[in-house]
């Protein structure tokens, strides 16, 4: 064998060269017991090209193996393991570092900025999964900035201080208060397992697609040690559900203000062919500045080209009849849920809340449109708003865009009025 210009052993021309990569073999040394006459040239070094013609000749005094021609396949299913251990006497305090790593770390140009955290695009994570195919295709049409929604593989503690104070909880997540290390502003950080990666990607994409003053903003999302960290703006008064109860009767102006804020967000969402599917008091967040914002897009989805969906999603007591009946539904299912939330603010609880879930489903499916417990105590404008949003006939029910024109919303309080009201309610008053 002869060594050519680029350091490869060669015999019989290029067609006889077979590469042995780092992942396939580290070294192969010739066994002298097989052939006493073999030269040192038959020793294969790591990463070189070896001539099969030279190693497996048929006969001849220089052959390595005797007998018939041998067909050699490539190794499969091999994994190259790198064992690194602590050693104070070794460079960088680590023993077993690959040579390439040592060179990189020894390079004076290498600093903490040389290693860039991996950034994953949410659309790339969902692409190829048939379950999300309709959602991805719809989002590409309606949300050009979808490619910019990402999850970064980095430690959130580098950017935020995570408090042990839990401020919320969901089916698969817990929400903690956090503080930005850059400027000290407060945030809410939702923490959940990375097994929820794809649903979280869907949630992030929809929440970013409906960028609106009345939708909770997501600052950034991290994937770290098998946990997902969704960093959101802090809504310091918590959810609307925290204020609803038998001891708190919301004035009509406050109910109109909340409904107007959420309808403005829903109108944008529905125009983009998306549905929230879980409108309820728990997912409407409030701030001490009087802000009202829609959150938790975990059940949100995209409509088909026909503008409909058929899977059953949502929370039972706020669920629209067409969803309970497993019929196709549109954004008007969100309108029903908002109507139930308005009733909840008026009566202190949603209709049928005293019933077991199965019984509540049967009642939603078969009962006429729900009404306030004491309709005589409310204005005709509010009662008509409820009739338009809680019509069991989907075709007759108003859309979010239509409800925004309803006279009842003209009675909505100003931000300052709602701010004063919500800050006047103490925790004791809610019970």
Image (cartoon, helix red, strand yellow):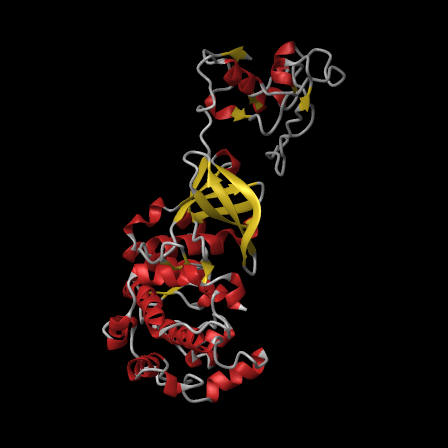
* Residue 29 placement: quadrant: top right
Left or right of residue 70, residue 291 in this image? left
Percent from the top left, x then y, of residue 267?
A: 29, 66
* 348, above or below 125, in the image: below
Residue 187 point in image, percent of width and height: 45, 46
Quadrant, the N terminus: top right
| Residue drawn at (41%, 52%) of the image | 204
Q: Choose between 195 and 61: the one closer to the eye.
A: 195
* Residue at image point 42% right, 80% down: 322
Query: Would you say residue 11 is visible in this rendering?
Result: no
- Specify the quadrant that holds the C terminus: bottom right
Total residue callouts: 0
x and y, in percent, of residue 355 in the image: 57, 82
Q: Nearer the viewer, residue 1 or 118?
A: 118
Q: Nearer the viewer, residue 37 or 43?
A: 43
Q: Is residue 362 above or below residue 412?
A: below
Residue at x 40% of width, y 72% of height: 250
> Horizontally, is 307 left or right of 94 in the view?
left
Q: Compared to 84, does 61 lie above or below?
A: above
| Residue 428 visible in the shown view | yes
């Amino acid at each position: 064998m002869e060594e050519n210009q680029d350091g490869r052993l060669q015999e019989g021309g290029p067609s006889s060269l077979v590469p042995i990569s780092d992942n396939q073999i580290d070294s192969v040394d010739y066994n002298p017991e097989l052939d006493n006459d073999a030269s040192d040239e038959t020793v294969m070094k790591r990463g070189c090209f070896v001539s099969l013609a030279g190693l497996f000749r048929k006969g001849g005094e220089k052959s390595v193996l005797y007998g018939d021609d041998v067909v050699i396949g490539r190794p499969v299913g091999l994994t190259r393991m790198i064992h690194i251990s602590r050693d104070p006497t070794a460079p960088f305090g680590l023993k077993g570092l690959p040579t390439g790593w040592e060179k990189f770390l020894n390079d004076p140009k290498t600093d903490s900025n040389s290693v860039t955290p991996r950034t994953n695009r949410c659309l790339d994570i969902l692409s190829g999964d048939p379950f999300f195919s309709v959602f991805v295709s719809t989002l590409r049409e309606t949300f050009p900035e979808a490619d910019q929604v990402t999850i970064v593989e980095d430690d959130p503690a580098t950017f935020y201080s995570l408090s042990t104070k839990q401020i919320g909880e969901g089916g698969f997540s817990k929400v903690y208060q956090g503080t930005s290390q850059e400027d000290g502003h407060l945030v809410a950080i939702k923490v959940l397992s990375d097994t929820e990666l794809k649903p979280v990607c869907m949630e992030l994409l929809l929440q970013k697609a409906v960028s609106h003053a009345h939708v909770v903003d997501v600052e950034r999302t991290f994937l770290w040690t098998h946990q997902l960290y969704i960093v959101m703006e802090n809504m310091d008064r918590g959810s609307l559900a925290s204020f609803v109860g038998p001891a708190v009767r919301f004035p009509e102006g406050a109910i109109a203000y909340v409904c107007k804020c959420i309808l403005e967000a829903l109108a944008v969402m529905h125009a983009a062919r998306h549905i929230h599917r879980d409108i309820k008091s728990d997912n409407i967040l409030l701030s001490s500045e009087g802000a009202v914002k829609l959150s938790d897009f975990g059940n949100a989805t995209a409509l088909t080209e026909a503008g409909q969906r058929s899977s059953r999603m949502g929370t039972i007591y706020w669920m629209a009849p067409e969803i309970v009946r497993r019929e196709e539904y549109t954004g008007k299912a969100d309108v029903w849920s908002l109507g139930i939330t308005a009733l909840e603010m008026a009566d202190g609880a949603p209709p049928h809340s005293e019933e077991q879930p199965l019984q509540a489903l049967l009642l939603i499916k078969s009962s006429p449109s729900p009404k306030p417990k004491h309709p005589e105590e409310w204005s005709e404008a509010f009662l008509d708003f409820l009739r338009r949003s809680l019509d069991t006939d989907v075709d007759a029910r108003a859309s979010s865009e239509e409800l925004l024109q309803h006279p009842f919303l003209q009675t909505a309080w100003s931000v300052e009025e709602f701010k004063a009201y919500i800050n006047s309610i103490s925790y004791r008053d809610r019970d």
